[in-house]
Image: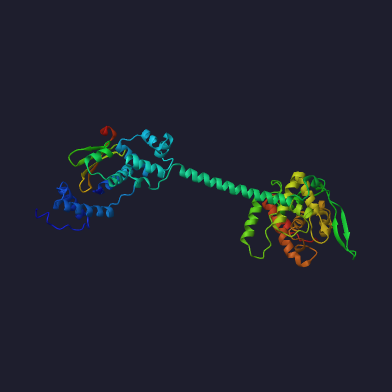
Amino acid sequence: MTERQALPVRPIRSEADHRAALVEIDRLFAAEPGSEAADRLEVLCLLVADYERKTHPIASPDPITYLTLAMQAKGRTQAELAELLGSRSRASEVLNRRRHLSAEMIAKLSEAWGVAREPLSMPYAVAGSIKRTALRGAALLGLLASLSASAIGGLFWAHGRDLPSTAEIARYAPPIIERYGRDGGLREYRRPVPLSTIPPHVLKAFLAAEDQDYYRHGGYSLPAILRAAAQNLASLGESRTPAGAATITQQLAKNLLLPGQPPSLARKVKEIVLASRIEDALSKDRILELYLNQIYFGGYAYGIAAASAQYFGKSPADLGVAEAAYLAALPKAPNTYRLDIADNRGRAKERRDWVLRRMADDGLITASAAQFAQAEPLIGP
Amino acid sequence: MIVIGASALAAYGEAHPQAGPGLRALNALLRQATWRARNELARDCGAVARFVSEDAVAFALPQVGCSVAFRVNFELGVIRIIAVTTINEEDAT
């Protein structure tokens, strides 16, 4: 025994200790089995292995890379793997990462070829995983969309089956009504007028105030409905009136075919169903004509002719821009803006001027025409 | 087997990232081995292993792009990685 071999084995705490230990291992590597040098070599190897595990860890291999290397080392071919696994496609899919190694496959590889089980059992991704996950996600979304569509379809069918048909709507003709109360006072006055007798600036005032997209939508506006739904959700629990998102066609449906029904989801669904049927049955101009002759303007006035007479003592054909804007302001809240109630006039003028600004913004009248109209008093001298 | 000098595998893998997965697989292959004699090593790795002396072996891994030299002490069950060197496929054939 040499003096060097008699030195005690020290723990390996640094790279310098590590390098020195490796040098000694190399010197002792061929030590006679059972000798003191072999004992020292064994202890040094254990200490170095432990140090390297802590300081130079090497991650577990990918199972397929491991299998490929093991096959290469043994001189095994893909054809032999196919024979072992029972099918060429199975072997190809495993090696090309399109199929996971099953427990049965790992057992066969271990028993027949002596390939270690542990490295083959580590988790790994196969090529189809992401695609399959995406397909499953898309299928789930599709299913949810189908269920939602079915539920919405069912809701519309349930609320739409008892409503007037397209043919019944097409036959509708607005009546002339002059109804008085027991005191002899006028309660309801309707006198329908054809659209052709209503000046363009009057029509523009109503379109600006009530439905800027009237000639572009099919009776209802999905973006507007979604916006209103979002607003209503955001204000849940507050005492605000729910946002309506009603087009002129929906307002006609509500006034003509659903009078007196309080706001609700069911009424909104019916409005949409009826609006769609009205658009199928009638032209846009006819719908606008019915709307203008149907809506309530406060007091006894139902329809544009009655309103023109009640507030200005005129026929619709004689209305000016400012007067048209005022009448267009009324359907939103007739009794809030009625001119014959003095307290309303400030609010009424604000609303009329808002309609005029909106007409100018939409290019329906010039900015100067809007300014001149805003300067006019609500009630003439 | 106990593998020492595996830091050489890690260092080579860091310098040659494309070789990293193959060297991790080799490290696992050596650790999982239970060779007690040369013939057992030859049985498991004869297609890539070449004995260059009584206890020194060279593993040629052309698909990984390198050759790994190591010594084996079958009695103690120890593998000492000596070196990892770059090769190309022409050298290996």
Residue A147 visible (yes or no): yes
Residue B82 image point, x, y percent = 21, 44
- Location of residue A319 by image quarter: bottom right
Residue A200's place in the image compared with A94, above or below, is below
Give the number of marks.
Answer: 0
Figure colour scheme = rainbow
Q: Hey, which residue is sitting farthest front in the picture? A: A111
Q: Quadrant of the C terminus of chain A?
A: bottom right
- Location of residue A89 by image quarter: top left
Seen from the viewer's position, the closer of residues A314 and A147 is A147
Residue A258's place in the image compared with A135, above or below, is below
Residue A308 image point, x, y percent = 82, 56
Seen from the viewer's position, the closer of residues B59 and A169 is B59
Residue at horizontal 64%, vertical 65%? A238
**Left or right of B53: which side holds A104?**
right
Residue at horizontal 21%, vertical 49%? B76
Residue A319 visible (yes or no): no
Residue A13's place in the image compared with B48, above or below, is below
**Left or right of A239: which side holds A103?**
left
Residue A185 image point, x, y percent = 88, 63
- Location of residue B59 by image quarter: top left
**Left or right of B70: which side holds A165?**
right
Residue B26 image point, x, y percent = 29, 43
